[in-house]
């Protein structure tokens, strides 16, 4: 059992931001390579690409609640360490595939699945922020994670695209592995535990094992009147946005369309990350202060309808950039606001477990999204992953507005 030095708020927030940024930078480097490598080297279908992209998130769905529950019992730091170690190993496995030494679709799928099993760092980071921030500052703290995501995508995809164009597919993956190593070292030697010792002891004394993958437990959380609606809204938004994973690259590189190369596609993802970062650093605080968090969530869903639904109708890079910008703003609003509202309505003792379940269900949405996107891309046409995602967000916006306007944000219980 660890006996950590009490964490200082400012230092801890900075370390969490830096650790997530470095890890997501490595993830961003790999992201634009997956569909292109699958099509050009492995010669597999769009539906199978959806499976490869989504298998990572399926494993997150199965294991994130476990990491969240363990972080409540043993602390946030050990979960971060184990998670980042798994990320390092998975990158090394993926490098074998991308180098051509073991050109196997099965090993490709296994490497992505292995990475998903150990992808518990986000829920642990969210729980750590909840540990050290009061409810009125929670949105700002959660925004740091969203900003780390966005900045990871600012540099990661463009770096991955440029490196793969010049040095092959394997080299960017090795760079990603090196970045995971840096984040791991930081989590071991710099990050201080945030969950108080007395809460960890109390949680470990629970004799009954609560299976976080139990369907009944998930339904109980979804049905919870105080915070269940935020989990549902987050799930729908993530599913709709995830339709573009894989299909966005395939759409952009179509020979009879925009015909972009890997580096250019990487720049597109970087542009998406820049907009997302600007939203988190500058725009979202103004919007939340002016309109409130619930209205920010509704606005984010509304913008996502157009940003997502119009991608397939982009006939030039300029139009695609404009639509992508709208999507990035909407996604930044709804992701940050929904997680912040969720965390404000959960008691301190259950932050890790509930946020872990939320991340798990959102991971399941990120599995279903690419799978659905690949299916409709292959059988209905290149525009339909985006059209169907936009249609779903229409219903999500109505549900969000109708549900959140019934009551104001309640106190945690």
Image (cartoon, rainbow, N blue to C red):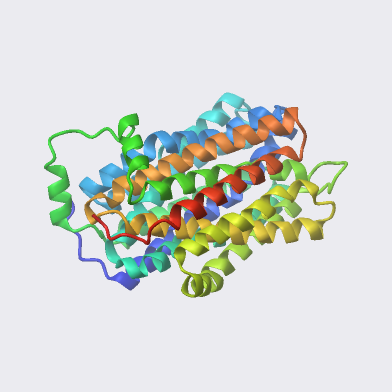
Q: Nearer the viewer, residue 246 or 12?
A: 246
Q: Is residue 209 left or right of residue 162?
A: left
Q: Is residue 275 left or right of residue 296?
A: right
User: Whole-percent x and y of residue 338?
Assistant: 45, 55
Q: Nearer the viewer, residue 195 or 300?
A: 300
- Number of marks in the rendered image: 0
Among all residues in the image, which is located at the extreme right? 256
**Residue at x-position 35% and y-position 30%:** 215
Q: Is residue 99 visible?
A: no
Q: Nearer the viewer, residue 4 or 98?
A: 4
User: Whole-percent x and y of residue 114?
Assistant: 46, 34
Q: Is residue 405 visible?
A: yes
Q: Is residue 131 left or right of residue 59?
A: left
**Residue at x-position 23% and y-position 35%:** 210
**Residue at x-position 17% and y-position 46%:** 203
User: Whole-percent x and y of residue 285?
Assistant: 49, 72
Against 96, residue 165 (above or below) is below
User: Whole-percent x and y of residue 126?
Assistant: 37, 56
Quarter holding the C terminus is bottom left
Q: Is residue 321 left or right of residue 246?
A: right
On the image, which quarter does residue 195 sit in?
bottom left
């Amino acid at each position: 059992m660890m006996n950590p030095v009490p964490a200082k708020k400012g230092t801890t927030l900075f370390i969490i931001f830096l650790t997530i940024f470095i890890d997501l930078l490595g993830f961003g480097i790999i992201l634009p390579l997956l569909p292109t490598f699958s099509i050009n080297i492995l010669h597999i279908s769009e539906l199978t690409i959806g499976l490869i992209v989504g298998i990572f998130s399926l494993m997150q769905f199965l294991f994130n609640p476990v990491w969240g529950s363990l972080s409540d019992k043993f602390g946030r730091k050990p979960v971060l360490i184990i998670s980042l170690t798994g990320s390092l190993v998975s990158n090394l496995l993926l490098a074998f595939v991308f180098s051509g030494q073991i050109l196997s679709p099965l090993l490709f799928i296994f490497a992505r699945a292995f990475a998903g099993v150990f992808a518990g760092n986000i829920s642990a980071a969210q729980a750590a922020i909840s540990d050290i921030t009061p409810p009125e500052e929670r949105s700002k703290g959660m925004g740091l994670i969203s900003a780390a995501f966005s900045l990871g995508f600012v540099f990661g995809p463009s770096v991955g695209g440029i490196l793969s164009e010049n040095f092959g597919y394997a080299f960017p993956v090795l760079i990603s592995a090196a970045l995971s190593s840096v984040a791991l070292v930081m989590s071991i030697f710099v990050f201080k535990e945030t969950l108080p010792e007395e809460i960890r002891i109390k949680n470990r004394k629970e004799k009954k094992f609560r299976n976080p993958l139990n369907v009944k437990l998930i339904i109980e959380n979804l049905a919870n009147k105080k915070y269940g609606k935020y989990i549902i809204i987050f799930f729908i938004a993530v599913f709709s946005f995830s339709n573009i994973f894989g299909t966005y690259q395939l759409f952009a590189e179509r020979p009879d369309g925009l015909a972009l190369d890997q580096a250019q596609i990487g720049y597109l993802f970087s542009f998406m990350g820049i907009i997302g970062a600007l939203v988190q650093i500058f725009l979202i605080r103004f919007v939340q202060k002016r309109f409130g968090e619930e209205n920010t969530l509704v606005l984010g869903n509304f913008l996502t309808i157009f940003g997502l639904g119009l991608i397939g109708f982009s006939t030039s890079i300029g139009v695609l950039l404009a639509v992508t910008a709208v999507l990035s703003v909407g996604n930044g609003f709804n992701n940050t606001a929904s997680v912040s509202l969720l965390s404000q309505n959960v008691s301190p003792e259950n932050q890790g477990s509930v946020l872990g379940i939320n991340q798990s269900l959102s991971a399941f949405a990120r599995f279903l999204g690419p799978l659905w996107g690949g299916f409709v891309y292959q059988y209905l046409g290149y525009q339909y992953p985006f059209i169907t995602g936009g249609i779903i967000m229409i219903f999500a916006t109505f549900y969000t507005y109708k549900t959140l306007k019934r009551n104001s944000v309640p106190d945690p219980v």
